[in-house]
Image: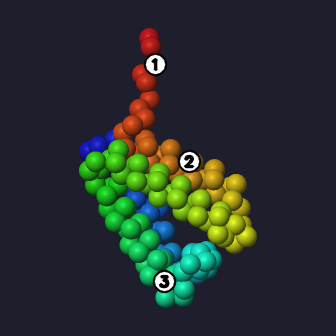
Amino acid sequence: MSSLLLPRAAIASVWLYQGLWCKLLGRTPHHQEIIGMVPFLNASQTHWALVALGSLECVLAVWVVSGIRAREAALVQIFLLVSMYAAGLFWAYRAIPDPVGMLFQNFVFLSLAWVAAGELRPHAAAC
């Protein structure tokens, strides 16, 4: 059993929660509200953007837990979260209750994603 299974499962569970529960099942209307603030999306496009993003997050959950091409999965996660954070700040800053807190949470999350990819390994202490 891989020592990276637990961090991968933790990362995947966050993506699954965000994608399936919050977006696809619509349990967090705040997500639709934020996407709805993108000025070039109408109501229908907002819905489909939410479905596409939620689906992408679910696929990402499966990819992360699989461990296949883990470094590339980590890079995609970094790109996706940075893009979502930047877009949220640009178009929906007023709807994000704690942008600084979200930045710190995302930093910790992406650090764990990098660990789960096997890119950060603790060094053995010299004896």
Q: Nearer the viewer, residue 96 or 9?
A: 96
Q: Can you tell which quarter of the image residue 126 is in?
A: top left
What's the CA distance linking mark 1 and mark 3? 54 Å
Residue at the spot of label 2: 108
- Residue at the top extreme, as displayed: 127
Q: Residue at x 41, y 48 (%)?
A: 75
Query: Could you tell me the amino acid type at mark 1?
Result: Ala
SS type, badge 2: helix
Query: Could you tell me the amino acid type at mark 2?
Result: Val
First along the sequence among labels 2 and 3: 3
What's the CA distance linking mark 2 and mark 1? 24 Å
Against 119, is 70 above or below?
below
SS type, badge 1: loop
Residue 86 shows in the view: yes
Residue 49 is left or right of residue 61, and the answer is right
Q: Residue at x 38, y 72 (%)?
A: 55
Residue at the spot of label 1: 125
Query: Where residue 86 sits: x, y (%)?
Result: 59, 59
Residue at the spot of label 3: 45
